Image (spheres, coloured by chain):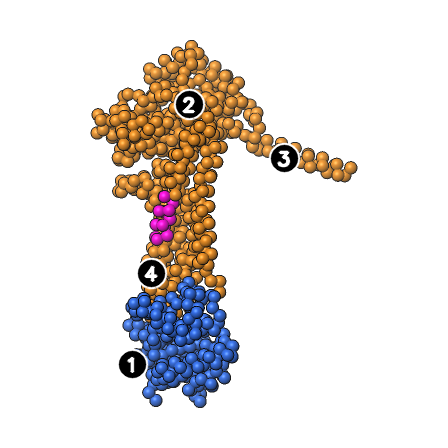
Amino acid sequence: MTVRRRKYAGLIRIASLAGLATLLLPGFSAAPSQAQDLRWAGDPEGGAPFVESDPTHPDKLVGFDVEIAVLVARGLGRRASFINITFTSIDQSIDRGDADIGLSGIEDTPARRAAMATTVPYYQFREVLSVRDDDASRFRTLADLSGRRVATLGGTIAYEILLRAEREFGIQAISYDDDLHPYSDLVIGRVDAVLLDNVLAERRSRSISGFTIQPQSIAVGQYVGVLAVRNAGLRDEVDKILRRAMGDGTLERIFRKWHVWNDDQPRLYARVLAREPVPAVGGFEATEMAATLSTWEAALRYLPSLIRASAVTIMLSCLAMALAVLLGMLIASGRVYGNRLTQALLMGYVEIMRGTPILLQLFVLYYGVAGLIRLPAFAAALLGLAFNYAAYESEIYRGALEAVPAGQLEAGRILGLSERQVLALVRGPQAFRLALAPMTNDFVALLKDSSLVSVLTVLELTKQTQIFATNIGSWIIPGLLCAILYLAMSLPLAALARRLEKRWKAPTA
Amino acid sequence: MNAMLRLREVCLARGPRQVLAGVSFDVGRGELVALMGPSGAGKTTVLRVIAGLEIFQSGTVHLEELALNGGGCHPPATLHSLRGKVGMVFQFHHLFEHLPVIKNVWLAPVHARRIPLREAERQARDLLAALGVEHRATALPRELSGGEAERVAIARALAVDPPLLLLDEPTASLDSARRTELRDLLRGLTREGRTLLVATHDEEFARSCATRVLRVKEGLVLEEC
């Protein structure tokens, strides 16, 4: 009896824990936790005219997607409640149940249609090419840009178009994480053209001068709302509300208010209201897109680019580490042997590099000082990683230099070796052996930190994986391949380090 | 006596502790002098002062025409000249842990004396052979026995051919048979015209090989017998 009661007690405890989890974690249960709220996901970093913080009241959100969310919520008899989610993660978050609907200038793609419940399209855009004013007459189409660098936002239809143009016209596709820097880099000459939708292009042309938007459109696409497949019923209700708003001019009023209304929209609305099928992408062969392939076909197609990206990762990591080791040794020597001023300056450098995020340092190096020195992306990434890791390496070497017994140095001095020779022939080599283990550790860390340089448009392994995952709408195969490739690079490194350590084992006595 | 080394009133304090309280003595060319005394008496410090490894507060050390003065850092030029004249074998040897025995011996001749590598390596082999440790040429210091390490340390010190050799507790890690061998070895070095100053607390060893014994006690050289 006692045993059975204990068993029940355990079951009751598990049941109450599950109940507690359902209460605490909004995404834990399949049913929406608060029926009166329509939880909608968006990314205010995308900015106006989609979603942005009101400049006069930063707590308040404004934008056409905000107004559409309110419109939909009202139509459902619910209250719109905003959930801030990074643009590239909206699909996954909706699928997890963090929010009911995503509205943030989300593109209609075959992948989304397959993996999510998408609403009817509510806005049509054109993919347009922007070039520097001086190039306006010679770069009109992607074919004119053979051998040139063309930028866009990663994981978008525009990026797929550029990937195909790489094969067809020999352009070089450059992927950015935001839609501001493609244009600022275009103006200063880091890239030769930008392919993005007309809404984004026109928005940037208002704040950045020096580029021209070409009138000819490369492809046509639409914005849609996304819901989880299990919420198809809710999606149908949202579609009804959107159709009504198309018919009674509510959507027109919203888009006019945000200055993005044009003649494409009435044509789109007429097709939607007539229940004609609207292709996800127009003017671009959608069968080419990775999303229409099976996962394994997509994996095979992406494997060469993942391997190329691994080569970038390993090359960048090796060069950055070599430079970091060299700089670290110089800094450590300066801190051990230098005068007070040198020591103070080097200590300042080490503290600044260790005390600020590497991401910030990379941004400053690439975008911040672009007015003074315009580093190519790879060089900025290499220097950024090397400067940061040099600070950590220098601390390892300083500790190791100071750990070499004084007797070893005195033995060198008394034999007539100069201080420099003592450092180069006795102290340095012995310190290096002591530093080897922590140094290998740092190299493996650097190999993984190198993924941060994707913010500077360097297409390394993690970034390529992210693009792959976004395009096929799943992280499982891309994540697995990516992990295998990282391990294939880091494990031999660890084995080599163990062998060296064994060979050069520092004396314990 | 033709004094090669002359210490006069050398005083050295570490904080409140007076380690050397006015040490004065002479060592003649070709002598083998033992510096005796209990642990902590200041024997090692005397050797380190002579080798230029310690700054002392007052007094002078004369080594042939070279003078080290108390009261401040030694000028680099003085230290440079001193390095050619004094060799030292440390109590714990301080062999370069990362280098094999042969490289320990030829490192200084090649880099400090600019002797061509091949020539320096040949001399190093000869020295190791003379000291009976040629067979350990490729071993790392941590693989040596105490006696072998002592001999390699002597070979390394002799490789730069210093007229004065300082040895700190050379018998510390040796059994009696090895001690006898070492005594014969040191005597042989004096026959070659080298001057030796040996710090030891091994009375028997001192009496059996030294030409003269100095006694250090409480920072002073108290008696000479």
State the CA–CA distance, disc 3 to disc 2: 40 Å
Indicate which label's residue lies in the foreground, 4 or 2.
Answer: 2
**Tags 3 and 2 on a common chain:** yes
Q: Which mark is residue B65?
A: 1
Q: Which residues are magenta?
A: A315-327
- The residue lying toward the viewer, choosing from A479 and A494, is A494
- Count of marks placed on residues: 4
Residue under pointer 2: A109
Q: Which chain is blue in the picture?
A: B
State the CA–CA distance, disc 1 to disc 2: 92 Å
Amino acid found under the numbered disc labelled 2:
Thr
Mark 2 nearby-residue class (10 Å; few <14, some 14–19, many ≥20): many
Indicate which label's residue lies in the foreground, 3 or 2.
Answer: 2
Percent position of residue A221, x then y: 37, 21
Residue under pointer 4: A338
Amino acid found under the numbered disc labelled 1:
Glu
Residue under pointer 3: A17
